[in-house]
Every structure is written in structure tokens, then in C-alpha cells.
Image (cartoon, helix red, strand yellow):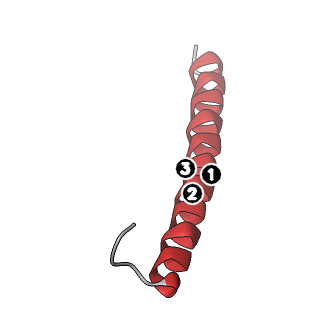
Amino acid sequence: MPGQTRVELDEVRELKKRVRLLEQKNEVLRRAAAYLSQGVLRSSK
């Protein structure tokens, strides 16, 4: 990336890594919520 310093490139790399991790955690939570809501729906019948 033109005009960016080494520090900025390192920061961007770390931030992208953090975004990936947070997206993975979000997916786990989304799946857990879907799974748990199925149990609630079954037990309320």
C-alpha cells in the first residue's frame, strides 16, 4: 500500500486478524443462540 508506514501496515494486519477472530466468535454465538432457541421452542409445546 503506497504511502503507508511499516507501523501502519502492522496495525492493519493485526486489526484484520482481530476482525476475523471476532467474526468467528460472532458465528459461534449466532449458532448457539439458534440451537438454544430450538430447545426453548420444543419445550414450550
Disc 1, SS: helix
Residue shown at 61% from the left, 22% from the top: 38
* Kind of residue at badge 3: Glu
What x and y, as percent, mark residue 42? 63, 17
Relative placement, left or right, of 2 versus 21 is: left
Q: Spot the residue most to the top.
A: 45
What x and y, as percent, mark residue 20? 58, 53
Residue shown at 65% from the left, 21% from the top: 43
Q: Are marks 2 and 1 in contact (CB under 8 Å)?
A: yes
Q: Are marks 2 and 3 in contact (CB under 8 Å)?
A: yes
Q: Is residue 16 above or below residue 24?
A: below
Residue closest to the eye, 35 or 11: 11
Q: Which mark is residue 23?
A: 3
Residue position for label 2: 22
Q: Which of the 4 image quadrants contains residue 13?
A: bottom right
* Kind of residue at badge 1: Lys
- Image quadrant holding the C terminus, namely top right
Residue position for label 1: 25
What x and y, as percent, mark residue 27? 58, 41
